[in-house]
Amino acid sequence: MQNQNKKELLTLFVKSILMGTANKLPGISGGLVALITGFYHEMITSFKNINLKIFKVAFKGDIKKLIKDYNILFLITILLGIVVSYFTTSKILDFFFKLSELNVWSFFYGMIVASLLILIKQNKLNNKKEIFFLIIGLLIGIILSFSEPIKENQNIFFVFICGMISICGMIIPGISGSFLLILLGNYKLLLVDSVNELIKLVNLSFGINNSTELDFHLIKILIVFSLGSLVGLITLSNLLSYLINKHKNTINQLIIGFTSGSLLIIWPWKKVITVNVENFNKINNLENPSNYLRYFPDISQTSNIIALGLILIGFAIVLYIENYGDRKKHIWSGRKEH
């Protein structure tokens, strides 16, 4: 590993903010952004090198060894950038959710459809095994789409698992961690609500906000989710890298099938048709429905025209990023060969 100077660390910090932000947007992979901006390979290698010995070295206070053997400055910079992105992006998402959930989910829907088409284009079916995994993924997605929607789940163990699963978007370019959270029903809880609660706590600590209405359970949820993400990042790096390297097309066919079958879950035009009494006050919150009535939009309404436009914008953004990423990959591969 190279020793980074202050300028390089600052640049890396900005790049990691972009990566963390991308990982919160369904359809865009944080790993892809890391690949585009040129630090993906070093990031994966650095996380692979982390083991229990690092705690012994840290306890001894051997900073030089931490920097040399574990690239610790590089890793700390990335983690700080991700944390900052969670604070900033969360407030932006919360603002747009309150402004119009339809527009937010429409934008996300365009991103996810574009990602799916890119995966289909890049991964041709080559054998019966891949067809089998495509069908399995498709069936799972369809079953989820027509089943009772997965509700928000604040169980601590489930939140920890969500953290481990969502981090896949940073490890594997092409997989959107936030899309996985949408399917698990905890997107808004983990990437918006809990982060905003932590921001309220920070503001209160500095006397910026005089509000005392803090939900410490949400803060605990965020801590558990972050721990799950960190554990997943460290423990899954080797496993996921192995699976992608050895069975890339098979795994991608499973993802293609699953994503195709589950597109109905995130269809923007839907209404809550039944709501539990305990959730009556949350009747406008699409993350806590008992069931959905999905419908086609009336294109004579201005709001629906805007939503359709946002689908196209989200679609175009992902295609542009993927196209730019492909060019960067070729440049990186060429440099590696020399």
Image (cartoon, rainbow, N blue to C red):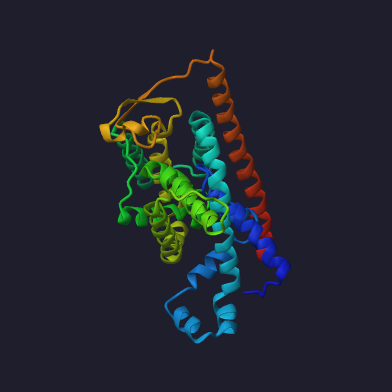
Q: Where in the figure is residue 110, as x and y percent of width and height? A: 53, 33
**Image height of 62 relative to 244, above or below:** below
Say left or right for 101 vs 143. right
**Total numbered labels placed on residues in the image:** 0
Report the residue at 53% width, 21% height from top: 304
Of residue 217 and residue 210, the one placed in the foreground of this image is: 210
Q: Residue at x 47, y 19 (%)?
A: 297
Pick the front one: 228 or 51:
228
Measured as percent of width and height from the top left, residue 148 is found at 28, 34
Q: Is residue 266 visible?
A: yes
* Spot occupied by residue 234 in the image (x, y as percentages of width and height): 45, 66
Quadrant of residue 77 within the rendered picture: bottom right
Give the residue at x 27% y 35%: 278
Which x, y percent locates residue 89? 56, 47
Which quadrant holds residue 64? bottom right
Residue extending furthest left?
277
Residue 108 visible, this angle:
no
Residue 76 placement: quadrant: bottom right
Residue sitting at the far top: 300
Q: Which quadrant, please, contains the N terminus?
A: bottom right
Image position of 126 (left or right of 122): left
The quadrant the C terminus occupies is bottom right
Compared to residue 285, the image places residue 90 above or below, namely: below
- Residue closer to the observer: 247 or 217: 217
Residue 244 in the image: above or below residue 104: below
